[in-house]
């Protein structure tokens, strides 16, 4: 068993999502389409080309996300929400395009009605509960009752809040839960990320645990892979300099492609909680290790002393653990200087 691995996995379509396995990579498109459906399609296509397993959108509207008092103080925000929200028809269209591109579609709902639409009409591959809704019991209960795989982000959440959310899935007998460590800062200072939370959550909950990243670049999510993250979620954009909420903390195409390929490498390198040598490394001993050799010429019948021995490559002779046995033994034959000393050369009587 790998380090800290729980005997539990979640099936998202054809993917087995589990700890210390090649991570399930989600390209979080969110609102990075800036309301342009063609841009959203291009992001889907590029996410597939980069090797992501899934994309994710967000279902919200001006009326479902903020109350009027917020817009009274921020008309620009109201304008952005009008322009960047996706209708149900948009989500259906994007799901169909994902199917054509052979990449999984996921979505973050804002309301119970969103979940019902995503499950019944869109047939979403998974549901994502945003960090802001960790205490939204009606939303989480509705998601749990669908039986669909559900991914919950824990940004801003206390352990008690996360535990309460997980217990809802246990109550509904829905084992298709994935918990993500997240820090709801955009971007967070590195000192506030605390990737060891992944280990903590994995030990606490019997489910796959992943990481939702809002840092700059891809170093931090790659480090999360080394901690056994089952899922990597990273915002995805065409251009990090574009105007919008998340572009700056997003991955572009090259970032995402590197994230996917390097995650695969890191997963292989993490290995298992043991010390096990490969056959190739065992064979390497013959070249790299040292053997006992004669430091100077040893005459037949001579009693071998410590000063008569040296230690040099290759490792095909007697290894250094035999030093104490060889010392004070008698040479059966002449042994030339710098020659390997073998058992057949020694009289132990």
Image (tube, rainbow, N blue to C red):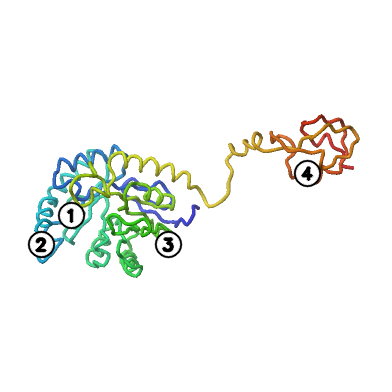
Q: Residue 318's spot in the image, x, y percent?
A: 75, 38
Q: Earlier in the sequence, mark 1 or mark 2?
A: 1
Identify the residue at image location x=12%, y=53%.
80
In-image side of 180 versus 338 (left or right): left
Looking at the picture, tell me which residue is in the foreground, 34 or 299.
299
Secondary structure of residue under mark 4: helix
Circle on res. 200 = 3
Give the distance between the C-alpha atoms of the residues marked 2 and 4, in whole angstroms. Answer: 83 Å
Answer yes or no: do the residues labelled 4 and 3 have beta carbons within 8 Å?
no
Q: Secondary structure at mark 3?
A: helix
* Residue count near mark 1 (Cα–Cα under 10 Å), binned few <14, some 14–19, many ≥20: many
Vertical placement of residue 342 versus 78, above or below: above
Nearest to N terminus: mark 3 or mark 1:
1
Q: Which of the two labelled residues, at mark 2 and mark 4, occupies the earlier sequence position? A: 2
- x and y, in percent, of residue 220 in the image: 37, 50
Mark 3 Cα within 10 Å, few/some/many (few <14, many 20+)? few
Which label sits on residue 71?
2
Q: Which mark is residue 59?
A: 1
Q: Which residue is mark 4?
A: 323
Q: Which mark is residue 336?
A: none
Check if mark 1's residue and mark 4's residue have beta carbons within 8 Å: no
Of 131 and 176, which appears nearest the observer?
131
Helix, strand or loop at mark 2: helix
**Which label lies toward us, 4 or 3?**
4
* Numbered disc in front, either 1 or 2: 2
Circle nearer the viewer, 2 or 3: 2
Ranked by sequence position, the earlier of labels 1 and 4 is 1
């Amino acid at each position: 068993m790998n380090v800290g691995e729980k005997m539990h996995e979640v099936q998202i379509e054809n993917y087995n999502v589990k700890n210390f396995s090649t991570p399930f990579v989600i390209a979080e498109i969110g609102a990075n389409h800036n309301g342009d459906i063609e841009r959203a399609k291009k992001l889907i296509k590029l996410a597939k080309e980069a090797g992501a397993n899934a994309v994710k959108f967000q279902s919200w509207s001006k009326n479902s996300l903020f109350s009027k008092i917020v817009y009274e103080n921020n008309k620009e925000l109201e304008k952005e929400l009008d322009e960047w929200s996706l209708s149900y028809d948009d989500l259906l269209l994007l799901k169909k395009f994902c199917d054509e591109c052979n990449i999984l579609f996921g979505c973050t709902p804002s309301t119970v009605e969103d979940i019902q639409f995503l499950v019944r009409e869109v047939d979403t591959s998974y549901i994502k509960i945003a960090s802001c809704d960790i205490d939204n019991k009606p939303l989480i209960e509705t998601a749990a009752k669908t039986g669909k795989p559900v991914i919950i982000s824990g940004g801003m959440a206390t352990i008690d809040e996360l535990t309460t959310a997980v217990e809802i899935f246990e109550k509904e007998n829905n084992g298709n839960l994935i918990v993500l460590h997240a820090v709801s800062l955009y971007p967070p200072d590195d000192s506030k990320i605390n990737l060891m939370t992944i280990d903590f959550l994995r030990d606490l909950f019997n489910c796959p645990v992943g990481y939702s990243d809002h840092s700059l670049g891809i170093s931090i999510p790659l480090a999360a892979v080394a901690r056994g993250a089952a899922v990597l979620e990273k915002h995805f954009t065409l251009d990090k300099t574009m105007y919008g909420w998340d572009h700056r903390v997003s991955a572009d195409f090259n970032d995402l492609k590197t994230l996917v390929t390097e995650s695969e490498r890191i997963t292989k390198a993490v290995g298992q909680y043991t010390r096990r040598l490969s056959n190739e490394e065992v064979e390497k001993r013959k070249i790299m290790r040292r053997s006992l050799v004669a430091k100077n010429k040893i005459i037949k019948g001579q009693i071998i002393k410590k000063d008569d021995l040296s230690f040099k490559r290759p490792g095909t002779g007697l290894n250094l653990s035999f030093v104490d046995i060889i010392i004070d033994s008698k040479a059966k034959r002449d042994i030339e200087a710098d020659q390997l000393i073998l058992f057949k050369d020694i009289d132990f009587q």
